[in-house]
Each structure stands twice: as C-alpha cells, then as structure tokens.
Image (cartoon, helix red, strand yellow):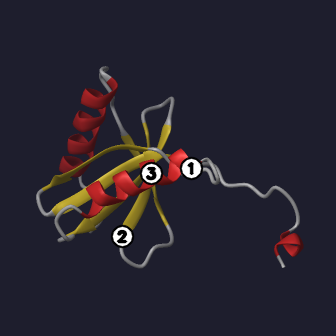
Amino acid sequence: MRYTQPLLDCIGSALSETLGESTRLQWLRDLPGGDINQAAMLSDGRTNWFLKYHCNSPDGMFAAEARALAEISTQGCIKVPAAVVYGSEGNTAWLLLEYLELSSNGPASKLG
C-alpha cells in the first residue's frame, strides 16, 4: 500500500486529539528498510514524525510495539523513539513515532 489521503487524514486526526491542538500533516516521503512494515516521514511543518504502517496486520501489533518501546525507554540504556499514537484506517494499521535523526558518535571500527 502506498500513501492515501484517508490514511493521512486519519493519522492527522488522531495526532490532533493526542496533542490537543489542530494538526495538518504532510506526507514527505516513503522511507526505505523494513521487511514487515512500510515506513514514511510525515511533518506538520514544525515536527517530523516517523510512520510505520501495515496492511492486514495482526490485531494489536502496533499497540504491543508502543508498549514495548515505552518499557525499553524506562531502562535508560538506549534512545528509543516515543510512540505518539497508533490506530487504523480501513485494513491498514499504523504507528506514529517520534522521528529520530540518526548520526554517528564515532568510528564504526570501535564496535569491533
């Protein structure tokens, strides 16, 4: 599945409700990677968001991922994206996450 306006409207509505303010999202681009889910970068003009979405996903898949990310973040050992909101539109489930800019903190040779 690729970008559809109803999907973007659904996500924008849920994000507005979560943030308590009107939000108009734009689909910036599809992102590579992931064998199971599709991914995209969304923006409201101030904040970029990372979207994972999946057609015909197992029930509760993204709710479980949101809980797992919250639990991992309590450990403080690694930076994980915050799960902002999740839901579904038609047969497409989705999870909106904090967008993390990835960067190197040094040479990869230190990793072994």
Q: Earlier in the sequence, mark 3 or mark 2?
A: 2
**Residue type pointed to by label 2:** Asn
Residue behind mark 1: 75
Residue situated in front as seen by the camera: 79 or 96: 79
Residue 57 percent coordinates (x, y): 21, 70
**Residue type pointed to by label 3:** Glu
Q: Are marks 3 and 1 in contact (CB under 8 Å)?
A: yes
Q: Residue at x 27, y 67 (%)?
A: 54
- Taking the view exactly as shown, the residue that stands out farthest to the left is 90
Residue behind mark 2: 37
| Mark 1: few/some/many CA within 10 Å (<14, 14-19, 20+) | few
Q: Residue at x 45, y 73 (%)?
A: 34
Residue behind mark 3: 71
**Residue type pointed to by label 1:** Gln
Mark yes or no: residue 28 visible: no
Residue 13 percent coordinates (x, y): 22, 34
Residue situated in front as seen by the camera: 92 or 45: 92
Residue 108 location, quadrant: bottom right
Q: Quadrant of the N terminus?
A: bottom left
Q: Is residue 67 above or below residue 108?
A: above
Q: Is residue 35 above or below residue 83?
A: below
State how far apart marks 3 and 1 are (Cα): 7 Å
Q: Residue at x 73, y 55 (%)?
A: 103
